[in-house]
Image (spheres, rainbow, N blue to C red):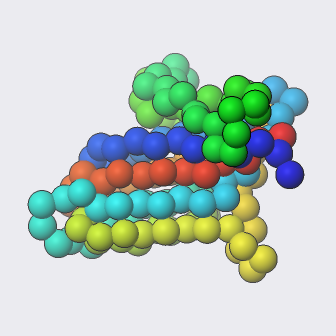
Amino acid sequence: MGNRYTVEFSGTPVSPNDFVTCISGTNRRIRILRVDVSGAGSSSAAQGLKLARSTLGTTPGGAITPSKSEHSDQLVANFTTATTWVAQPTIEANGYMIGYNALGPGQWQANAKTPTLEARNGENISLRALAGFTYQACKISLLIEED
């Protein structure tokens, strides 16, 4: 088991753009263990995000600094994040769908029957807005393990 970190952000997903991408460091690997989505919209409406591996885009920006999840003595996270891109990553065709309501919660969690998503040596995992929704604001937190 590696060190665990949290990454939190809020905003309005723009379909079908990347909402956040986690980029593993060289000679390191990351695993997404949990994703919590809290709708922060103004009216009830179906929403959906896709969690999947992706290829690296060009010129990432809008980084969010991961926080240590377990204790203050653990190392600073080696992986990085991006919320903006000049050219977005290409997300894989298959992944996990996270449905939620614009006023309510949604969750994805790895367990014995649902394996983690893993990226190694500069590979990515993206959270992407799905086409077909009129998005409202939401808050998202990720629990990420790195080793």
Question: Is residue 124 visible in this depiction of the protein?
Answer: no
**What is the x, y in percent for residue 20?**
48, 41
Quadrant housing residue 78 = top right
Query: Image quadrant for the C terminus?
Result: top right
Pinpoint residue 21: horizontal percent, then vertical percent: 54, 40
Looking at the rendered structure, the number of numbered marks drawn on it comes to: 0
Image vertical order of residue 115 relative to residue 79, above or below: below
Side of 53 relative to 136 (left or right): right
Residue ID at (87%, 30%): 27
Q: Residue 107: image x %, image y %?
A: 49, 68
Q: Is residue 2 visible?
A: yes
- Specify the quadrant of the image occupied by residue 122: top right
Is 111 located above or below residue 136 in the figure?
A: below
Q: Residue at position x 82%, y 45% from top?
A: 2
Return the x and y of residue 19 as percentages of the image width and height: 42, 44
Closer-to-camera residue (24/58): 24
Q: Nearer the viewer, residue 147 or 50?
A: 147
User: Which residue: 64% across, 44% down?
Assistant: 69
* Furthest residue toward bottom: 113
Give the residue at x 30% y 43%: 11
The answer to whether residue 12 is left or right of residue 126 is left
